[in-house]
Image (cartoon, rainbow, N blue to C red):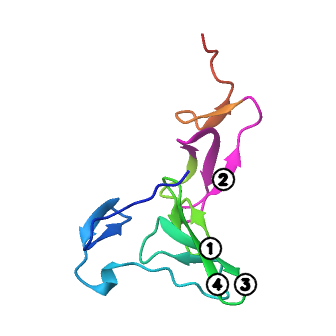
Amino acid sequence: MSDVAMCPAGYVYNPETSMCKKKLSDEDCIRIECDADEVLSPYGESKRYFGFCQLEGAMSINIRMYQCPDDTKFNGKGCVYECTAVGRFGVDSDPSVFYTCFEVGGEAMLEKCPVGKTFDKPKGVCTIPPPTN
């Protein structure tokens, strides 16, 4: 599900603050520039938003906007979790997956717990969740 952001006349949307800001110059209005050699394109200087460029016909380009999940950043190729420490780190949006970091500053590996288990953040391992009443 996506959200549509509408700003009043004379304002532009700022994806980093999720708010409208007064348009002071043409540069304030961010545009996606699709490259024939790249499917994904950055959205201005944003590290969270990017465009998916799809050629439709000879000259028409369809651009779809995407947002990286929380705790990840767009690196030009996709959304990555940047390691700030070595270890395993849970994903808030899905308790069955976690990131493994082998070095600070590196890119993490996304891993999934075995079926029936969830990632226990304090212990840093997959465990059988406690029964629900």
Cα–Cα span, label 1 and label 2:
16 Å
Q: In this view, does 25 lie to the left or right of 61?
A: left
The amino acid pointed to by label 1 is Lys
| Residue 125 screen position, x and y as percent | 64, 36
Does 55 appear above or below 82? below
Q: Nearer the viewer, mark 3 or mark 1?
A: 3
Sequence-wise, the earlier of marks 3 and 1 is 3
Residue 57 numbered tag: 3
The amino acid pointed to by label 3 is Gly
Residue assigned mark 1: 77
Cα–Cα span, label 3 and label 1:
24 Å
- For image coordinates 55% across by 72% down, the residue present is 51
Task: Check residue 91 for magenta coloring.
Answer: yes
Q: Which of marks 2 and 4 is in front?
A: 4
The secondary structure type at the circle numbered 2 is: strand
Quadrant for the C terminus, please. top right
Residue interval drawn in magenta: 89-116
Residue 52 numbered tag: none
The amino acid pointed to by label 4 is Ser
